[in-house]
Image: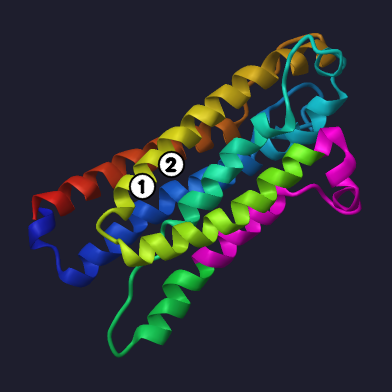
Amino acid sequence: MPDSQLPPATSRLALRASRLIPHALAWLGYFGPWLWPVPVALRLSGYDLVEWLTFAQSVRDGTYPITRLDMLWPLVGIALLTALTVRSVTGPHFLRAFAVQNWVAILLSLFAAFLILPGYPFILTAASDAELRSQLVLGLATIPAVLVMVAWAAARPRWAPLARVAVALLSLAATLRAYALARQPIADIFTRPAPVGWGLVAAVVGFAAVIVVEAAMAWRLRSR
């Protein structure tokens, strides 16, 4: 049945699903296994690689100039994308709609920004630690950036799809770059290339799907 003939409720549900699933894939993909070396029980997610690569001798001696930020940029993208899903809500059901549709997105995006920060107790000395300082700065910068994206998405809903396309494009590039950088140092540790895990595939598919869905939505809005 063509979209124009779908009942309004069904059409809205389909639209929400088409937006929710790509974002969920990006979240699951980043925290799912990117590399699946032997033994099989060891699964390295994008988030795990932030720490794991610091133990790689080829990274520590400068053979591969990789930093923690290289593995964290996709998470920054996830935080900003989630913040940009906030919708402008008006009318008599404002409070209920805002609570249901927006507060979850705001809390999730702030949670992603919080995960960028160094863990406790390292965050206490991160400002004076050359290795952790840049991670601390990135996490602290992402928090207000999330809040700005939330306010902007709510105030400029017609431009939000284009912003999501831009952020998803950058996040997709950051994800592919992070994998390309991490693959060889991990292969050096285990003396063989590690197979690609489902997490990397899910993250790539998720970001790519966000681009497609939001580009279509932006085109639809501009055509009205």
Q: Residue at x 33, y 70 (%)?
A: 88
The magenta span reads 105-132
- Read off the residue under disc 1: 163
Q: x%, y% of residue 92?
A: 30, 90
- Read off the residue under disc 2: 167
Kindly identify the amino acid type of the residue bearing the numbered disc 2: Val
Image check: 201 left or right of 213? right
- Residue 70, by quadrant, is top right
Q: Nearer the viewer, residue 168 or 198?
A: 168
> Residue at the front extreme?
128
| Majority SS type along the magenta span | helix
Q: x%, y% of residue 179?
A: 61, 23
Query: How far separated are the C-alphas under marks 1 and 2?
Result: 6 Å
Q: Would you say residue 65 sits in the magenta stretch?
A: no
User: Mark 1 and 2 residues: CB-CB less than 8 Å, in contact?
Assistant: yes
Kindly identify the amino acid type of the residue bearing the numbered disc 1: Ala
